[in-house]
């Protein structure tokens, strides 16, 4: 969706192809750095854009900062046009940083889970929630093992249902 938004001069032309965001409070958007529409598997880095529709803010988490800054900023601009309201783009420079070139995808998954379960679903409407992940430790290896277990559990559940 992000790639499509960034490549489209007028995001409103995509409205019928995208979900209805009219009753949405937050949108999680994994961002890839692919810029070439000719290469299906292009791009080499992922980051996360969390759009707070109700606050009009797009928070960008990049584990190889500032690698995806421009992709995050442009996606924020385009999703704002789609939503019919400008978004304030906040690049969170204090995002946890990966120490290799292969953990960006797992960082995005762990960040999404943490932000959803430990921030947004725990939030009190009367209290401002910090969206910073400055103190969040990310263990990519442990995250991969957890994801593998979830996939394996689903596979086993599928086998039970088929038998």
Image (cartoon, rainbow, N blue to C red):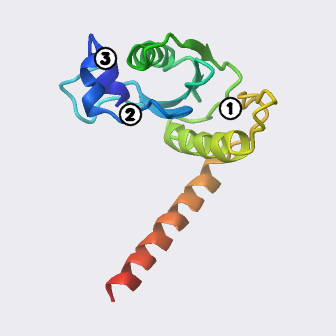
Q: In the visual, does 118 lie left or right of 155?
A: right
- Above or below — where is 21 with respect to 145? above
Query: Does label 1 or label 3 sit earlier along the sequence?
Result: 3
Instruction: Give the residue at x 37% y 82%.
Output: 161
Q: Secondary structure at mark 1?
A: loop
Work out whether residue 135 or residue 9 is closer to the camera in this orientation and state it: 9
Q: Residues within 10 Å of mark 2 (few under 14, many from 20)?
A: few
Q: Which mark is residue 108?
A: none
Residues at marks 1 and 3, CA–CA distance in whole angstroms: 31 Å
Image quadrant assignment for residue 90: top right
Query: Does label 1 or label 2 sit earlier along the sequence?
Result: 2
Query: Does label 2 or label 3 sit earlier along the sequence?
Result: 3
Residue 13: x and y in percent read 24, 19
Q: Which residue is mark 2?
A: 20
Q: Which residue is mark 3?
A: 11
Q: Quadrant of the N terminus?
A: top left
Q: Quadrant of the C terminus?
A: bottom left
Query: Looking at the image, do the residues carrying marks 2 and 3 touch, with CB atoms under 8 Å apart?
Result: no
Give the foreground label among 1 and 3.
3
Q: Secondary structure at mark 3?
A: helix
Instruction: Give the residue at x 18% y 25%.
Output: 38
Residues at marks 2 and 3, CA–CA distance in whole angstroms: 13 Å
Instruction: Give the residue at x 51% y 15%.
Output: 69
Residue 27: x and y in percent read 51, 33
Q: Residue furthest front?
A: 23
Q: Secondary structure at mark 2?
A: loop
Work out whether residue 69 or residue 77 is closer to the camera in this orientation and state it: 77
Q: Residues within 10 Å of mark 3 (few under 14, many from 20)?
A: some
Residues at marks 1 and 2, CA–CA distance in whole angstroms: 32 Å
Image quadrant assignment for residue 99: top right
Q: Which residue is mark 1?
A: 96
């Amino acid at each position: 969706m992000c790639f499509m938004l960034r490549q489209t001069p007028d995001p409103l032309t995509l409205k019928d192809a995208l979900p209805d965001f009219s009753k949405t409070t937050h949108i999680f958007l994994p961002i890839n750095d692919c810029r070439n529409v000719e290469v299906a598997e292009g791009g080499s880095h992922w980051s996360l854009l969390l759009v707070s529709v109700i606050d009009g803010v797009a928070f960008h988490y990049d584990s190889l900062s500032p690698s995806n800054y421009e992709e995050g900023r442009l996606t924020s601009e385009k999703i704002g046009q789609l939503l019919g309201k400008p978004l304030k783009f906040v690049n969170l420079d204090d995002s946890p940083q990966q120490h290799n070139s292969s953990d960006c995808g797992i960082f995005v998954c762990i960040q999404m889970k943490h932000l959803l379960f430990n921030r947004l679903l725990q939030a009190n409407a009367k209290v401002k929630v910090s969206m910073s992940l400055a103190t969040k430790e990310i263990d990519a290896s442990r995250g991969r093992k957890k994801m593998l277990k979830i996939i394996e559990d689903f596979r086993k559940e599928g086998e039970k249902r088929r038998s």
